[in-house]
Image: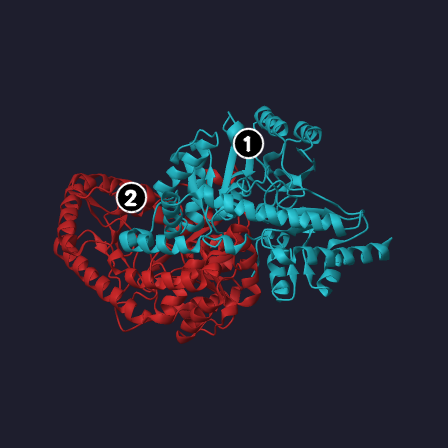
Chain colours: A red, B cyan
Amino acid sequence: MKFASRVKELKPSDIQEMFKVIAKPEVISFASGVPDPDLFPVKEIDEITSKIIRQNGDMALQYNTTEGYVPLRKKIALRMKQNGVESSSENIIITSGAQQGLELSAKLFLNKGDAVICESPTYSGAINAFKSYSPEFIQITTDKNGMKMDELKKVLETRNNIKMIYVITDFQNPTGKSWSVERRKELIELSKSYDIPIIEDSAYEEIYFTDNKKPTLKSLDTGGRVIYLGSFSKTFCPGLRMGWIEVKKSILKNYITLKQSSDMHTNILAQMQIDKYLELYDFDAHIDNIISSYKNKRDKMINAIKKYFPSSCSHTYPEGGMFIWVVMPDKLDGRKVLDEALKENVAFIPGESFYPDRETKNTFRLNFSNAEESKIEKGIEKLAVVLKRVIDNVY
Amino acid sequence: MKFASRVKELKPSDIQEMFKVIAKPEVISFASGVPDPDLFPVKEIDEITSKIIRQNGDMALQYNTTEGYVPLRKKIALRMKQNGVESSSENIIITSGAQQGLELSAKLFLNKGDAVICESPTYSGAINAFKSYSPEFIQITTDKNGMKMDELKKVLETRNNIKMIYVITDFQNPTGKSWSVERRKELIELSKSYDIPIIEDSAYEEIYFTDNKKPTLKSLDTGGRVIYLGSFSKTFCPGLRMGWIEVKKSILKNYITLKQSSDMHTNILAQMQIDKYLELYDFDAHIDNIISSYKNKRDKMINAIKKYFPSSCSHTYPEGGMFIWVVMPDKLDGRKVLDEALKENVAFIPGESFYPDRETKNTFRLNFSNAEESKIEKGIEKLAVVLKRVIDNVY
């Protein structure tokens, strides 16, 4: 039996593999990329679900259309309008998480050998979704304001196989960085000049810790080139696998065809659960709770890092989301540091898998959203001891 | 913006498009391919779901592993063992419906230009899932016992780009035909000789109307070349989008990697719902209810066809599943007949979309599972009038 050539390019996700290692109760883990389950609206979902199944069980359990449940698509469009996007239900397809939005986007735009531009580093799940279609990755360096525009411009000027630009402008996974408004506007202009679509992964957009929520690319886009991937995983819960794509109708029809052959449609009960939640409860108040909890954890982690980490390690200061990014001295390798850290029962994700070429080794990602608040300081202190020891050994 | 070349090969499903036309209450529809919602275990699902969310809500709403919920995978393996398959939970990955099993199989095996062998006609959803990977389709004629083996042998002998064989051996969609045991064994031998994997789509396997349940290809397979796609859509409900793949471990790991980048994992609440149902209720008794209802409808439809249809139209006599297949005189086109039928408020699916090359026009599919029992005879009678009129006009 022969597999397709794409198979050998794919690697199982380090992150999922790692869950097996860190399941031990004595491990203080900053490795996961998951939301805090204590914040899931469990009681409300119980009430809602029973209502749906009793009143509308036949529909909740039957096949449905590929694009998804109309009342939910209307509510999503309304929320997007409130965020400055000209949207309607006919611009929206429900997906099985934003991850499916990434997969379908690659399938829609990438022939073998086409290039996709992404931030360096970028989300590992996007790298894997894109790799199935054997593209070339062009990584653009980022500073604290987003992609470096001179570097991006040079690439756009000199290359003619670029088919899409993938970015997470808010509280990126893995770095926690956000783009400045100016850079966002510049990116929109460039996508217009070169007529290249932007895949905007907004998974963390709503988890912001300052009053200064920045406009999405989608809201700045007048040319219909931004394809917005939305997610309920961080604001509601990830287990139901619910996301959406917001895009102009002429492109949406292609997403519908591609999704139809991928999985027919997303679990319709799950669509109705979220729809009913949005109808009956105050979603924004719920998100405010999440924000307040994660902000508190972010503060605890940043304070501990400042207190304990060696000064040769730098870190980001995220204004939202779930992650802090650490850059160690050049010669260090996140994987080797992790081996040492695990001996001390602390875990994180080495940065390597967030680079398509896996060539940058001296970085790692810390998650604070799912860290146990009372253990954050202790865990960072332990990690700092490991870092100092490893640095002393290498330098 | 430029789409990938695969996009122009894809067509939106006729079937989903058609739902819009047949939604009118006055239409007697034999078009759908959906189960009867009156048979969904709605009350039981209500009870189960509430239990799961109250007792284990955190887990039911959080991220989970790509391969799926272990207790459910164990129960599926046990059911497969009872059907003669050496299986364990480690041979099983949960998918978002069997449709996702088709998509992932194409992704795993097909490079552009590779060939896939399928029955002629075959399931339209499989054609669309495979088309995304731009294969060559080789259609093998079927008779009442399955694929014609001499034709298949000739193809296997003369072609060297064949990467997989796709079959529905039980109560096929669209024809309702089943393979003889002998043909099943011959297929297994051929897959061994040529070392080519078989994708066994078993969506209808459990809905059989005789005492003579035939062995699955998987249960006859000693070489580990059969990849079994299971589905809960016809035995439980389709809205939760639950299926599975049963395959040897060395191949399963590739499916896990591919699914991980497609949608992370299937809705975990849905996995727990089915698991709990299998734990607390008599699944086989539930399936017996479905069988008895569909068998009754099959009988009603067959009797009406025999009574009213012109003798120049032939039809299959399905011993299970949800479909009857009609072959009209050569010069007729199912699409044009449908236009006429819709004027009389009767609907079916023209056969064209069940052929990868769409070149056979004089066929159509009738669904009985979701037909209203009291309207079956009336609908078939009306359709017969249309058929006679069209045939008279053409011949």
Q: Is residue A109 visible?
A: no
- Residue A262: x and y in percent read 52, 50
- Secondary structure beneath label 1: helix
Q: Chain of mark 1?
A: B
Residue B69 in the figure: left or right of residue A376: right
Q: Of residues A267 and B132, which is closer to you in this image?
A: A267
Marks 2/1: CA distance? 36 Å
- What residue occupies the far right of the structure in this picture? B395
At mark 2, the secondary structure is: helix
Q: Is residue B339 visible?
A: yes
Q: Mark 2 is on which residue type?
A: Phe
The quarter in which the C terminus of chain A is drawn is: top left
Q: Which mark is residue B73?
A: none
Residues at marks 2 and 1 touching, judged by CB atoms closer than 8 Å? no
Give the image location of residue B361, x and y in percent. 75, 50
Relative to B128, A197 lies left or right: left
Residue identifier under label 2: A19
Q: How many marks?
A: 2
Nearest to viewer (mark 2 / mark 1) = 1
Q: Residue at x 12, y 56 (%)?
A: A307
- Residue that badge 1 annotates: B217
